[in-house]
Amino acid sequence: MADKYDVLKLENQLCFPLYACSKEIVRRYKPFLDEIDLTYTQYITMMVLWEHRQMNVKELGEILYLDSGTLTPVLKKLEQKGYVNRTRTKEDERVLLVSVTEEGMKLRERAVDIPAKLGGCIGMSPEDAEQMYILLKKLMACCEESE
Amino acid sequence: MADKYDVLKLENQLCFPLYACSKEIVRRYKPFLDEIDLTYTQYITMMVLWEHRQMNVKELGEILYLDSGTLTPVLKKLEQKGYVNRTRTKEDERVLLVSVTEEGMKLRERAVDIPAKLGGCIGMSPEDAEQMYILLKKLMACCEESE
DNA sequence: GGAAATTTAATTGTGTACAATTAAATCACG
DNA sequence: CGTGATTTAATTGTACACAATTAAATTTCC
């Protein structure tokens, strides 16, 4: 029954479940992120900034796998909400330094229970989650090394 | 060294590698999809249509996890390229039936080697890919059952 | 020291995603 | 039979995502 077009079936692809799953999880975040008025992209950006306090756009992009075309509007929005400051460095005027404000650090307090809330509503076993994490890292490494 | 904010680190999230990996894989498709002038979304839509020949927007959306807000412009674009026809059904004028054209089926021939090309440039072991697939299905099921 | 190359972020343009609303068609049910 | 509820796709509005280009600052290298 197999024919040469079987490889083009959605069910035989790894990429599609990955793509669908990613969107689905982000969708699950929405109700909780709505409570603190952040989008998912704004949220992961704040996660990096909460941890590092200060970072330039290039570094942020490398960590988040996003380019300035995506980050510039996100960062302007976060600045507008009062969570970050955007300033050029003295040493190199090209570099834009993004730093968390007082207000931004307060937001962290309201975000700290989101991961648990999400864990509660997704409910994958810790073993499976661990396995998945390892495989995703592996796949990501595969992708990057063949660059 | 652990503090209560550790849960908010990017590295402790499952969702972020999922999100980043998904985007990275789609990015890897781009050069090959460019050759047949399809975007990734257009490609997965065509995959469903190649297999089923004909399908309405609602069914397509259920398979692809996309709503009409996303599908309508994608399908109009595919129609414009000559790969699909869009017609209302006689029995129920609300339902839009999307069917592949001759031209659309010809495109399948040009797409058939894309999965192999991608496999070549990503190079995850079949065992890992299989394991990943199982876990993604599981995670997707978790998401949906807690709906 | 200065022109060419490089780096950095912003801008532009196209294409998703998705929530919310709209509008038309169909269905349900009193 | 007819009206209110439901279903279906399209539309509207907001927010990514990313390739390609631009512009300014810095570095390289002669």
Image (cartoon, coloured by chain):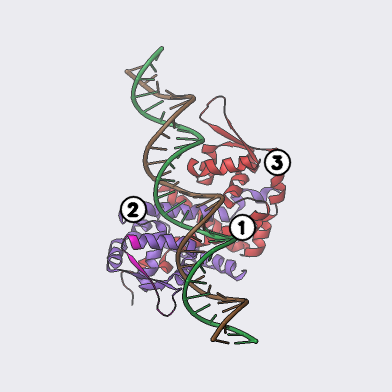
Chain colours: A purple, B red, C brown, D green
Q: In this view of the protein, which residue sits in the foreground, A85 or B128? A: A85
State whether residue A45 is above or below residue B38: below
State the residue at coordinates (48%, 64%). Answer: A68
Disc 1 crowd, CA 10 A, few/some/many (<14, 14-19, 20+)? some
Q: Position of residue A52 (x, y in %)?
A: 37, 73
Residue at numbered disc 3: B103
Residue at numbered disc 1: B30
User: Considering the image in quadrants, where does the N terminus of chain A appear?
Assistant: top right
Q: Secondary structure at mark 1?
A: helix
Q: Is residue B122 visible?
A: yes
- Residue type at the position of mark 2: Asp
Q: Quadrant of residue C9?
A: bottom left
State the residue at coordinates (57%, 57%). Answer: B26
User: Considering the image in quadrants, where does the C terminus of chain A appear?
Assistant: bottom right
Q: Position of residue D15 (x, y in %)?
A: 41, 54
CA–CA distance in space, label 3 to label 2: 44 Å
State whether residue B136 is above or below residue A131: above
Q: Quadrant of residue B123?
A: bottom right
Could you tell me if the residues under marks 2 and 1 are in contact, i.e. CB atoms within 8 Å? no
- Residue type at the position of mark 1: Lys
Q: Position of residue C24 (x, y in %)?
A: 47, 26
Q: Earlier in the sequence, mark 3 or mark 1?
A: 1
Q: For this view, does B109 lie left or right of residue B76? A: right
Within the magenta stretch, is there residue B99?
no
The subunit carrying tag 2 is: A
Q: Secondary structure at mark 3?
A: helix
- Residue type at the position of mark 3: Glu
The residue range painted magenta reads: A79-92
Residue at numbered disc 2: A34
The subunit carrying tag 3 is: B
